[in-house]
Every structure is written in structure tokens, then in C-alpha cells.
Amino acid sequence: MKINIDYLGKYLKRPPIGETRIKQYDGNTVTYEYLDHYTNTKETMTLPVLDFIARLICHIPDKNFRNIRYYGFLSNRLRGKLLPVVYKLLNMKNVITKKVYLSWRDMIRDSYKYDPMRCPLCKSVMTLKTVVLTLKYSLVSQHKEIAHGYFPLLL
């Protein structure tokens, strides 16, 4: 089992470092964040650019190297049958195995704690009644009409 995990860890298709982990680049040095597996804490490291690139390119596979995206119980063909069995064997009871549909409004509310369908001025729930193509009037002065859908189509 450990051999399979080590194999998958090396060859799954993903970038060696995410852009969000790179904190600063000034032309000479790169500062990035990483997880120290010994202490289980996030650490920050600053390296000269060429040293950073040297550490990065060792993770780039050779030309024509075939990356394996899903393997074993994670393969598309077997995941529906075997993933629930794996969860059961690992005593993982709180794992969601069904797809959950979230609307775009719910995703924005959950992520940013902001409701895109509420008027920022009067806090009323907006409904899409018309499309404003060209602005002839100030939106701030007409916000109640826009929020309640009583605004005529502007051309």
C-alpha cells in the first residue's frame, strides 16, 4: 500500500507549487510558503531566483512522460463502487459521497459572506426584471427602483 501511495504522490498531475504560495518576488529573491511536515506548521522561505528555479524544475516530468491522473480506487471506472468501500474500511462516516448542488448565489454567500442578490444600499432582495444596456441615470439615485425591478430598459 505504501508503495502505491508513494508512486501516486510523485506522478499525479498537478503543479509543483501553487501561485498562492508564492508570497513575494522582487527580481532577485522569491519568498514562498510551505508546510513543514515535521512540525505540521506553515513556514516561509526566501531563496535566490536561480535556487528557487532549481528546486522547481526537478518536479517537471520528462518530455513524453505520461502522467497518471487517477489510479486504483480513484479511477473513474471504479470510484463509484470502491470509494464507499474504502471509506467504510477507514471508518470515515462523515464523508459526503453524493454530489451536492450549490447555486452560484449560495457559493458566493458561503465563500465571501456576501449576498449578491441583496441591494448594498437598502438591503432588499433583488430580482432580475430588466437588463440595463446603457446608463443614462445614476444607479445610486435609482437603487430602489432597480432592486425592485421597476426600472425601464435603458438604451
Image (tube, helix red, strand yellow):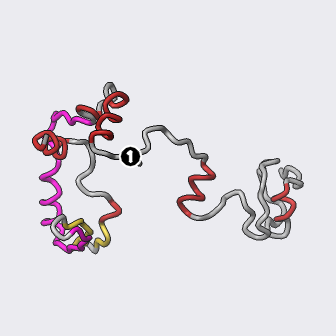
Q: Nearer the viewer, residue 33 or 103?
A: 103
The image position of residue 28, as x and y in percent, is 21, 74
Q: Residue at x 22, y 35 (%)?
A: 68
Q: Is label 1 in a helix, a strand or a loop?
A: loop
The image position of residue 30, as x and y in percent, is 23, 70
Give the vertical position of 31 relative to 119 (above or below): below
Q: Residue at x 56, y 58 (%)?
A: 110
The image position of residue 146, as x and y in percent, is 82, 58
Q: Residue at x 23, y 33 (%)?
A: 71
The image position of residue 93, as x and y in percent, is 38, 46
Q: Please give the residue where the numbered disc 1 appears in the rendered image.
A: 93
Type of the residue with mark 1:
Lys
Residue 78 on the magenta span? no
Left or right? Give the position of 91 relative to 56: right
Which residues are drawn in magenta?
Answer: 40-69
Extreme residue in the top direction: 77
